[in-house]
């Protein structure tokens, strides 16, 4: 009944309005968006407020109006950024690839190649087992910076940085807004999304409070034949954010922000195509959950000629990583992991930035990052398997338990200076000097056993329990600079060209199982100590232009990236133990474009895309053996991807606007991993596979009348089920991600 009710609502919405307009009252007025909007967007990618047109970086920026119109509530709404691939096979299982800089879409145990910031908090530094899906409601702006951003955003920004900037309270106007979204995926999967904001000016010009909340209940669309659950991958997510702004004087302000986001998917969205469409298998639900709590205090002070910003953030990040590993042995042996991680994070950044517009613009600052991650590892069999094989001696189903904690630090000083030689030519130089260290301690009280040996050999009887040795591993330490240099030239008032050289890095990695020999096959790889920082150099030339009063715009970038001492993640074949190491070099070359046109009033056309060639260029025999890579192997990135968006709008009455629109995107096929077996370079990895090339079409139609909006939409119109993600590890049987099936819905909003 609810499916029929929802479908009738959606059809009625589209049929009666013939349109759909998904923007809140903060959106530009009719005729102001589209091709002309890039001229007016102000970004803070350089830690100063600068027009997007003048920044010598490839940036795609999204306003709240654009996100609302697209129905974007998380990372999936950013998937059309040129040169960027979102590896999101399941909720809270996120990793971005930019400009081809990825050996696979997972990067377990490694820092992401794209730094993700929520305001001043780098959440991607939390690792790649789980990364939260943050809410993108009531944001000031989302900026995606492509290319290394090591000078201003530090480690992890190897190939880019994603910045989610939330809105500050307004001390001069009471306002509130809300957006609800009801959708139907497939025939019986119901989607509910609720978002609300209220802004209270407490003292005019001086004090204000802003409260934001969201709740999502999105029924799954996969069947888990192992657990017998229909629509098993249901997602329930909720969060609140409160922000208090105090303007003590016309120079000094304080913003206090607290947030709580809890994301609870009930099962993974990874599938096994061998079982049929939209099916997966695991002995119990695979869960990648996350709870992020943050406290931030940001103080700003306006000196004569410069602004001081001091931001202090404390965060707690709790995660579950519960996964069936039985695919390691073809499902013949009960083998699973229940892991629980708890992060304690503190981030301090202070910077002083000059007022813009002078002959010399500059920013200088310091950065400190501390993280302690505690992890409880619990490897399990199951009671039925233990009884069937008559394996005894365990107090419960867990055959191995131990805990460790890892402490990491980053301390950095950074600066960037722009020197203007006349009105049309300027030079920018920047440097960051960072010192990083990481160290892991195994805690006492853990144990392991020979369960896997008994299970593999078909033996029964009691297991042998062995204590896991406690102790502190070696500390990995590295220090060094990152650089940026660029020259910009304004060919005409609306045409800017630039050439940029920049570098990036990731922190070193310590392997928790360093030195451990496989109990299943002692001749397999001995786990190495870890991985040093990798190094990346980016050479880029670009053009940003506007013609015909903004009716035609173009942002173009041509780049070459040299990537050396590459951090890679591999898995020992015999027992699937993960480890990190370094290998030779790779090169990525590409071209990115964003073109906008408004040929007639009300019609906006946007075309963006990227052409990329990324492959391994240097490798020693030992590096090939341990990683499974070969010279010439493609990196995990499509050779071509692009998107075409067409939108037509017109006025309705005195205060209304209507529109119809759609986006057709294309992503080419690419490999999900290196081709060979780690430790056996002459054998093709059984998990080696490519994603599928696919097209995705989304359509919408709607209108706004004053503060009210109504939208009807269809996502994945053709109900394409292409493989969009390949998990590189053999231990999970369901290791493929797909597009979400066709979803029909209605979105309603009110903004005052």
Image (cartoon, rainbow, N blue to C red):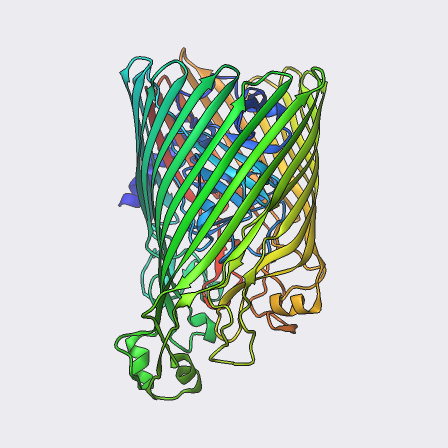
Observer-nearest of 560 and 729:
560
Q: Quadrant of residue 695?
A: top right
Q: Is residue 740 visible?
A: no
Q: Residue furthest top?
A: 654
Q: Quadrant of residue 74?
A: top left
Residue at image coords 41%, 87%: 458
How far from the left and from the top, in percent, is residue 338? 35, 64
Observer-nearest of 471 and 688:
471
How far from the left and from the top, in percent, is residue 289? 35, 53
66 sits to left or right of 260: right
Against 449, residue 46 (above or below) is above
368 sits to left or right of 159: left
How far from the left and from the top, in percent, is residue 326? 42, 71
Observer-nearest of 172 and 125:
125
Which quadrant is the N terminus positioned in? Answer: top left
Which quadrant is the C terminus positioned in? Answer: top left
Against 63, residue 370 (above or below) is below
How far from the left and from the top, in percent, is residue 733? 45, 67
Q: Is residue 241 visible?
A: yes
Residue at image coords 57%, 18%: 356
């Amino acid at each position: 009944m609810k499916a029929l009710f929802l479908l009738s609502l959606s059809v009625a919405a589209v049929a009666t309005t013939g349109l759909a307009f998904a923007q809140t009252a903060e959106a530009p007025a009719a005729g102001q968006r589209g091709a002309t909007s890039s001229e007016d967007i102000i970004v803070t990618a350089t830690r100063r407020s600068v027009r997007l047109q003048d920044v010598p970086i490839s940036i795609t920026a999204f306003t709240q109006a654009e996100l609302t119109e697209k129905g974007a509530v998380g990372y999936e709404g950013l998937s059309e950024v040129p040169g960027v691939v979102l590896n999101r096979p399941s909720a809270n299982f996120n990793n971005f690839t930019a400009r081809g800089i990825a050996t696979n879409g997972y990067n377990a145990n490694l820092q992401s190649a794209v730094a993700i910031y929520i305001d001043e908090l780098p959440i991607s530094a939390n690792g790649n087992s789980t990364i939260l899906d943050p809410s993108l409601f009531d944001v000031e702006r989302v900026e995606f910076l492509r290319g290394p951003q090591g000078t201003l955003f530090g480690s992890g920004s190897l190939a880019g940085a994603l910045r989610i900037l939330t809105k500050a309270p307004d001390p001069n106007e009471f306002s509130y807004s809300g957006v609800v979204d009801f959708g139907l995926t497939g025939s019986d999967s119901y989607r509910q999304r609720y978002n609300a904001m209220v802004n209270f000016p407490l003292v005019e010009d001086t004090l204000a409070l802003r409260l934001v909340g969201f709740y999502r209940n999105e029924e799954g669309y996969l069947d888990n034949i192992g657990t017998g659950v229909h629509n098993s991958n249901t997602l329930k997510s909720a969060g609140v954010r409160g922000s208090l702004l105090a303007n003590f004087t016309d120079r000094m302000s304080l913003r206090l922000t607290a947030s709580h986001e809890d994301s609870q998917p009930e099962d993974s969205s990874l599938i096994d195509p061998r079982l049929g469409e939209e099916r997966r298998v695991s002995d119990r639900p695979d869960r990648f959950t996350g709870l992020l709590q943050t406290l931030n205090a940001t103080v700003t002070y306006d000196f004569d000629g410069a602004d001081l910003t001091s931001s202090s953030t404390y965060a707690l990040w709790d995660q579950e990583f519960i996964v069936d590993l039985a695919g390691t042995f073809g499902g013949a042996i009960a083998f699973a992991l229940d892991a629980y991680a708890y992060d304690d994070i503190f981030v301090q950044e202070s910077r002083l930035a000059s007022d813009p517009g002078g002959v010399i613009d500059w920013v200088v600052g310091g950065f400190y990052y501390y993280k302690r991650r505690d992890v409880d590892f619990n490897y399990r069999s199951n009671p039925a398997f233990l009884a069937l094989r008559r394996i005894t001696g365990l107090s419960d189903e867990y055959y191995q338990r131990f805990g460790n904690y890892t402490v990491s630090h980053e301390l950095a000083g950074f600066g960037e200076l722009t020197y203007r030689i006349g009105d049309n030519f300027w030079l920018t130089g920047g440097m960051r000097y960072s010192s990083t260290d990481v160290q892991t301690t195994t805690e006492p009280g853990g144990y392991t056993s020979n369960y896997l040996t008994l299970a593999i050999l078909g033996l029964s009887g009691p297991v042998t329990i062995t204590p896991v040795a406690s102790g502190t591993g070696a500390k990995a330490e590295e220090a060094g600079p990152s650089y940026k240099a660029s020259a910009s030239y304004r060919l005409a008032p609306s045409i800017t060209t630039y050439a940029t050289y920049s570098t990036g890095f990731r922190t070193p990695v310590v392997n928790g199982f360093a030195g451990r020999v496989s109990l299943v096959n002692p001749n397999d790889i001995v786990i190495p100590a870890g991985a040093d920082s990798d190094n990346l150099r980016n050479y880029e030339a670009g053009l940003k232009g506007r013609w015909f009063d903004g009716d035609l715009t173009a942002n173009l970038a041509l780049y070459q990236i040299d990537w050396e001492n590459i951090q890679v993640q591999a898995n020992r074949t015999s027992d699937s133990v993960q480890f990190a190491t370094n290998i030779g070099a790779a090169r990525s070359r590409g071209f990115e474009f964003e073109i906008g046109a408004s040929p007639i009033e009300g019609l906006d056309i946007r075309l963006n895309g990227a052409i990329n060639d990324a492959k391994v260029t240097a490798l020693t025999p030992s590096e090939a053996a341990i990683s499974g890579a070969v010279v010439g192997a493609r990196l995990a990135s499509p050779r071509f991807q692009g998107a075409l968006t067409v939108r037509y709008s017109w006025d309705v009455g005195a205060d209304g606007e209507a529109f119809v629109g759609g986006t057709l995107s294309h992503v080419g096929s690419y490999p999900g991993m290196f081709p060979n077996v780690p430790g056996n370079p002459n054998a093709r990895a059984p998990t080696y596979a490519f994603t599928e090339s696919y097209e995705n079409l989304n359509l919408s139609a709607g209108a706004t009348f004053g503060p009210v909006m109504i939208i009807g939409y269809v996502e994945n119109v053709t109900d394409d089920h292409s493989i969009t993600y390949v998990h590189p590890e053999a231990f999970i049987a369901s290791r493929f991600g797909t597009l979400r099936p066709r979803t029909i819905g209605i979105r309603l909003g009110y903004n005052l």
